[in-house]
Amino acid sequence: MKGERKAVLPCNGLDKEAGALAREAALKLAEEGASLVCPVLFQRNPKRFEKELDAGELLVIDGCKTGCASKLAKEHGLKLAGRLNVTEMLKEVGIKGGKKPVPDPEHLARLLAALESVGEMEEESARETPSGLFAGDVEMSEFMEGKFIFKVPRDGYFFNENDCWARVEGKRARLGVSDYVQQSASDMVFFEPPALGAELEQFDDAGSLESTKTALDIISPVGGKVVAINEELVEAPELINEDPYGRGWAVEVELADFESDRELLMDCGAYLAYLKEKVKKENEERYG
Amino acid sequence: MGETTFMGVPREKIDWCPAIDYDKCDFCMECDEFCPHRVFERRDDEERKLVVAHPQNCVVFCRACAKTCGPDALSFPDKKETTAAIKRMREEAGGDEG
């Protein structure tokens, strides 16, 4: 990823070709100097790979969406520096993996080529935010329900009913999830950003998050083009728990048509009222 | 329990829930275990061992279960169409909601 020692954990699944390809991709990276973490051995004896995992950034390679390697990493509280999905990567080049756990040479060649370009893309850093934007502390309102305190900004943010926010300044907006989300989801362990340059419609997914309790998509309150990604958040997803409206921002977009999007959103006052009702109802349903 | 709304529209009028492709589903039950809103239900005695029992519980615009599905057996309505339908229904109900 950034020239540091890499550790790679493939799923090595035997149920279809994708697992065999994940293995081959991992072997290729091992040839280039990464430490190979065997999923089966790691399952039996996690201590065996302690050194490799402490020393390097972990790249997980899942064959398919079942995500066995990711789940294994998550069960052991491992922090992911990156994650690849073989089935998704092949889909992007119009290939569908086979049913037998044997790597097709052409599929493998295309996969390794895609791997190369992923490496290149990561060197491209996010475009700089114009200075002065999104600076300064945000004032919060707070309210209590049961033994929980929920925070909502006083101004400048717009929310959808999926509890995601857009902080709008001029033609740009930063996107994130609300304090309610970080409290419900608990500790965040992984942030998968959208692609730089992606054109999002209002309510499209703007990346996804995984916590110790659940997984959720960031549902963009606005339409626009992704112009920056919070690299700090990729490295430290827990920033969402620490500062969900500030340093925990996920994505920055250039707005397409905010005036139109705005009609379907709640401003800070409206969201505060909405959230109060929501948590009150949840409390009633839970405790009667 | 009372009426549930989403963006000012009665939830029952919004078409949003997962659809199971039974040609692909292997009944691993991951989606049911994952979903915190109890949208799915196991039916051990039936041929279709997993069904979408409570489509109204599904959070509009959430597609997290589809991302979890290994065999890619879950699909959702088009988000743009859903947004357009919600807009239409809000307008029909007459401006001052929410």
Image (cartoon, coloured by chain):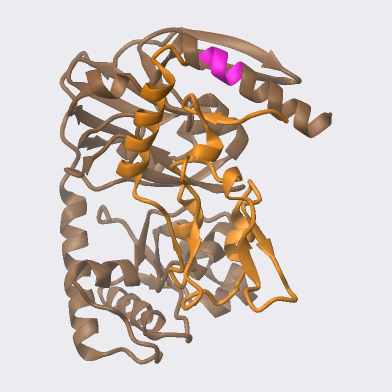
Chain colours: A brown, B orange
Classify A20 as above or below A30: below
The x, y position of residue A169, in whole percent, is 24, 15
Going by the image, does A258 lie left or right of A280?
A: left
Classify A241 as above or below A13: above
Going by the image, does A228 lie left or right of B73?
A: left
Q: Quadrant of residue A261?
A: top left
Identify the residue shown where x is 36% and y is 77%.
Answer: A22
Identify the residue shown where x is 34% and y is 64%.
Answer: A84
Magenta segment includes A105 = no
Identify the residue shown where x is 31% and y is 19%.
Answer: A262
Magenta segment includes A274 = yes
Identify the residue shown where x is 52% and y is 69%.
Answer: A49
Which residues are drawn in magenta?
A272-276
Q: Main secondary structure of the magenta part?
A: helix
Whether residue A94 is visible here, answered yes or no, is yes
Q: Quadrant of residue A138?
A: top left
The foreground one among A26 and A264 is A264
Classify A214 as above or below A129: below
The foreground one among B51 and A213 is B51
